[in-house]
Image: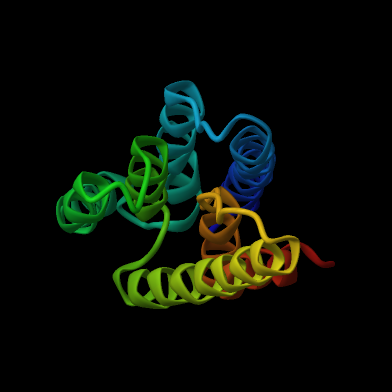
Amino acid sequence: MGEAQVWLAAAAALGLALLLARAVHSDLARRRISNRTCLAVALLAVPWWSGLAPDPAAVLGRQLALALVVALPLVVPFGLRLLGGGDVKLIAALALWLPPGEIVPMLLSTALCGAAMGLAAWLAARLRRAPVRPVPYGLAIAVGTSVALAPAIGGLVASLRP
């Protein structure tokens, strides 16, 4: 992998970090993750894999199939109103970024973070004697993705050092 490809992947990773921050902020403030943010996350997977993979076209084809496999089962929690549409779209877009072996760790990390947030919201509501409000899941998704992408980003950072 050449230096230009490493910088391309690093720039994509920085863009992803900014977009995840935007998604978290929007989800916390308005309980909404925009389609534009999800689309931008999905599109930034192209320079990410162009910088990392020897055959980006083949990898992107695999990632599209993987994103579909990840998104389809999420229709059930969406139908049960456990996840919002933005959450499902963001997870599908992020699946384009993750190697197949990192999908399950991402989903598990997301679920654990979401459960912790839900428990904290439940406890806070009990203490205030107020109804429990739904937990915005964007933060949990960002944390789960960060956990799953940490090894790849660590490798990028190491390769950028002189």
Residue sitting at 51 percent across and 52 percent down?
137
Residue 131 horizontal/vertical position (percent): 57, 53
Report whether 156 appears left or right of 96: right
Residue sitting at 58 percent across and 56 percent down?
142
Q: Nearer the viewer, residue 67 or 114?
A: 114
Q: Nearer the viewer, residue 15 or 88?
A: 88
Residue 157 is drawn in which quadrant? bottom right
Task: Give the residue furthest to the front.
Answer: 129
Residue 158 horizontal/vertical position (percent): 73, 72
Vertical arrangement, residue 61 with respect to residue 159, above or below: above
Task: Give the residue furthest to the right.
Answer: 162
Residue 127 is drawn in which quadrant? bottom right
Q: Quadrant of the C terminus?
A: bottom right
Vertical arrangement, residue 105 with respect to residue 107, above or below: below
Residue sitting at 66 percent across and 72 percent down?
123
Q: Nearer the viewer, residue 102 or 138?
A: 138
Residue sitting at 43 percent across and 45 percent down?
50
Residue 82 horizontal/vertical position (percent): 34, 53
